[in-house]
Amino acid sequence: GHETVWAQMLTEQLGVPFEAVRLVQGDTDRVGTGGGTAGSRSTYMAAGAMRLSADKVIEKGRLLVAALLAEPPDGIVFADGLFRAVGSNRSMHVMEVAELARRAATLDLPAAVREALADGLDSG
């Protein structure tokens, strides 16, 4: 059940395709400690963490899209999986932005944007 519920939550929050969500659990190489999962408590506890993570993805995505479209960050809005430049038809899907973020080191970006994208990332 967790695979379905958590994928549905991310699909709703970020507009990513359901089938693109991959759940990794029980991998001690990636997660040092934990209490396991138990019924509905897992969904309740994960919901808050996923919301905070989705908000961070949107925040960093807005910075990246703003830099790529030469717009101010407050000129980029996010809804239904799309980052849109206000007052124009220019937009980028969250999956495209995620791929660009993975390659941020190879893009011509302002240093502040590059640093913001790297903040909080791990090697996994």
Image (cartoon, rainbow, N blue to C red):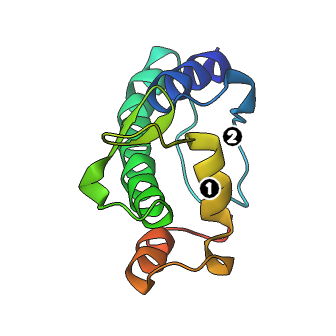
As drawn, the label of residue 72 is none
Amino acid on which disc 2 is placed: Gln
Taking the image as shown, residue 96 lies to the left or right of residue 13, namely: right
The residue that appears at 66% across and 64% down in the rendered structure is: 102
Taking the image as shown, residue 107 lies to the left or right of residue 50, namely: right
Residue sitting at the far bottom: 111
From the viewer's side, name the closer residue of 93 and 44.
Answer: 93
Label 1 sits on residue: 31
Amino acid on which disc 1 is placed: Val
The residue that appears at 50% across and 64% down in the rendered structure is: 68
How dense is the environment of label 1, judged by Cα within 10 Å: few (below 14), some, or many (20 and up)?
A: few
* Residue 103 point in image, percent of width and height: 68, 69
Quarter of the figure with residue 94:
top right
Label 2 sits on residue: 25
What separation in Å lies between label 1 and label 2 (alpha carbons)? Answer: 8 Å
The residue that appears at 53% across and 68% down in the rendered structure is: 121
